[in-house]
Amino acid sequence: MNQLIKATALTLLASLPMTASASLLSVWDSDWQQMTPTSGNGDGPVGPGVGGQPFDVEFLMYKFDASTNTLHVGLQTGFDIIDADNNGYTHTDGKTYYNGDLALSFDGSTSRYEYALDFGNLTKGYYGTNLGTDAAGLYQVSSWNTEVYSGHGVSNPFAMASGTLKVAGNSSNFTEGFATGADGKKSYYNMFSFNIGAIGLLGDFGLDAHWTMSCGNDYLDAHADVYVPEPAPFALLGLGLLGLGFMRRRAAQ
């Protein structure tokens, strides 16, 4: 049975064209930086599977606002990752494919991603396991689902199986959409932001990210080193003087 499924999947997807390098959408302003790909195909051809633009993972992006300690994370793909067109998934020759969750790690290891950005869409594994629909937001992950197509295991993890919501998505911290790039191809994007204090980060940190879809036809791993500026000496001095003044007022009372 597994051999039949495998042969069918390869036959259906091999008939679809490969894709050339993608282009960044204009929604990424100059403050955004591209994370450095460490594995997968990035803006290159789809792999380890095929399928062309509808199965392409293109860019992982980030920016950090030191004034508010806010980390912004972004994903751009050819795969429909928003609640538009096909309700967050892509139909190809009668087969339904679902988007995964954006896996994030801050502990310097990619052996187990501690957090997931859930886009709030219905998620199912390649072989039909229904993972349901979670509220959009940042989750601390208890366990991951790895149900991608069996021949594309390198693309795992796929989606959060269970976890705890840390930061809920809302209109101020979660943005999604699609646009046509300079290459004339349609791409989708998601942006999510949160204060790093919500996950206990205070100083500089490394950010590792990973994303794939239920077939695992393409995936992308990427890394960024994020530097958190120390408070300026004058600002610290001001806080010290403010505290001293408060203590004097308390003593006078």
Image: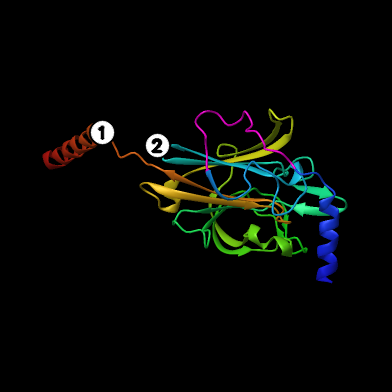
Check the image and name the residue furthest to the right: 94
Relative to 226, 140 lies left or right: right
Magenta run includes residue 33 = yes
Read off the magenta span: 19-35
**Residue 158 appears in the rendering:** no
Considering the whole magenta stretch, tell me its main secondary structure.
loop
Secondary structure, mark 2, is: loop
Between discs 1 and 2, the one toward the N terminus: 2
**Up-down: is 152 above or below 231?**
below
Q: Which secondary structure lies at badge 1?
A: helix
- As drawn, the label of residue 21 is none
Q: Relative to 180, is 214 above or below?
A: below
Percent x, y of residue 200: 41, 53
Label 1 close to label 2 by CB (< 8 Å): no
As rendered, which of 70 and 245 lies closer to the eye? 70
Q: Is residue 247 above or below residue 14?
A: above
In the picture, which quadrant includes the C terminus? top left
Q: Nearer the viewer, mark 1 or mark 2?
A: 2
Is residue 175 visible in the rendered structure shown here? yes
Which picture quadrant has residue 8?
A: bottom right
Which residue in the structure is indicated by mark 2? 66
- Residue 165 location in percent, x, y? 55, 55
Measured in 3D between alpha carbons, the distance from the residue under mark 1 to the one under mark 2, in whole angstroms, is 14 Å
Residue count near mark 1 (Cα–Cα under 10 Å), binned few <14, some 14–19, many ≥20: few
Outermost left residue: 252
Q: Is 18 included in the stretch rendered in magenta?
A: no
Residue at (82, 69) in percent of width and height:
3
Quadrant where the image shows the N terminus = bottom right
**Label 1: which residue?**
235
Q: Is residue 230 left or right of residue 107?
A: left
Amino acid, disc 1: Ala
Mark 2 closeness class: few <14, some 14–19, many ≥20 residues within 10 Å: few
